[in-house]
Image (cartoon, rainbow, N blue to C red):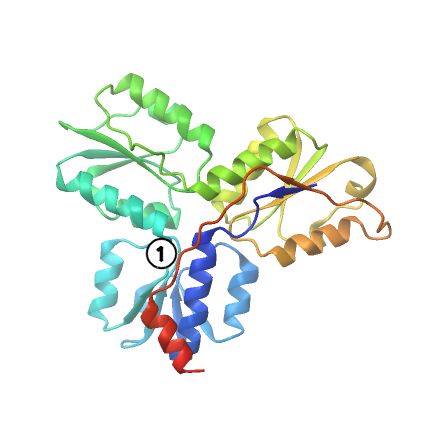
Amino acid sequence: MLAAPRGFCAGVAYAIEVVDLALRSYGTPLYVRHAIVHNEWVVRSFEARGAIFVEDIADIPEGSTVVFSAHGVSPAVRKEALDRGLRVIDATCPLVTKVHNEAKRFAAKGFHMVYIGHAGHVEAEGTMGEAPDRMTLVETPEQAETLELPPHDQLAVVTQTTLSVDEVGRIIEVLRRRFPHMQTPNKEDICYATTNRQMAVRALADQCDLVLVVGSKTSSNSNRLREVAETLGVESHLLMGADEVQPHWRTNYPVIGITSGASTPEALVEEVIGALIEGNPEVPVTVLETIREDVHFMPHRDLIQLAMAAG
């Protein structure tokens, strides 16, 4: 049983399209700061076309072209790129940009912010870089219970876009109790795609004996999908591809649910399905649709025109 929606979200599709257009427009070498999305298959496919992935702007030759990944970057990274004379193409997901803009707006008004996210995650580093002296990171409800904040008159919350909806809800509940004057966004910063995929995996877990999430171990939203299914009492595993399918899955579970992270190509899901029904092609494959998505982000028209001119 396949969850719908699953796989690529609009932000990931946008970032991948931007790198494709940049390669066609400017050729190689093309540098990408951090993995364009958290999926090794996608990264390898671009490396085969001449893209070079780096973590540090200092590793990019001066005057080169660089693409910023879907996860966004801090103002410090942008300044470093400018100082090195790099041509910058920004593939930041517009929904991540929205959170950056919120952080800048709160900082300009003198707020101190609690950032709900994962320490070390590239999206968290980028957003917190907007106002590093005005942000405190919280990862769990337990941390929220003991949180000590510097002196402040105004307090607001911003969040990473790829978190568990339930986990964020529990953290905000604690923060509201402890800091009644805290300001939260009108809508949760968790993006629509993360929310939709978690809702879909809930419906899947309700009807399945095993849930498989196809995605990278480095993908925050893929890990959250597995956790959501597991919290509902269903055995759940995160796997990158068909080579990780266990033989006993084919025989020990009457109904297997499959979903995939927002940066996972559908081809990997199809390979997993093929491995599961190998030797028994009459196994029915059904789709459980919970909501239909129609969001699309368009790359900048100048980049599209350059790619078209380059053929």
Quarter of the picture holding the C terminus:
bottom left
When the figure is inspected, residue 111 is found, relative to residue 90, above or below; the finding is above
Between 132 and 187, which is closer to the camera in this rendering?
187
- Residue 46 located left or right of residue 189: right
Picture coordinates of residue 50, whole percent (x, y): 48, 76
202, above or below 300, in the image:
above
Q: Where, by quadrant of the figure, is residue 231 drawn?
A: top right
Front in this rendered view, residue 155 or 287: 287
Q: Quadrant of the N terminus?
A: top right
Give the residue at mark 1: 92
Residue 234 image offset from top left, x and y in percent: 66, 30
Residue that extends furthest to the bottom in the rendered view of this protein: 310
Q: Residues within 10 Å of mark 1 (few under 14, many from 20)?
A: many
Tell me: 170 left or right of 47: left
Which secondary structure, mark 1? loop
Residue 84 location, quadrant: bottom left
Tell me where residue 309 appears, x and y as whole percent: 39, 82
Say whether residue 192 is visible.
yes
Return the x and y of residue 307 as percentages of the image width and height.
40, 76
Q: In this image, 172 relative to 132: left or right?
A: right
Q: Residue at x 69, y 55 (%)?
A: 270
Q: Is residue 291 left or right of residue 205?
A: left
Q: Residue at x 44, y 38 (%)?
A: 163
Circle 1: residue type: Thr
Report the residue at 45% width, 50% height from top.
295
Q: Residue 196 or 237: which is nearer the viewer?
A: 196
- Total number of numbered discs in the rendering: 1
In this view, the residue in front, 290 or 168, is: 290
Up/down of 184 relative to 268, above or below: above
Q: Is residue 35 visible?
A: no
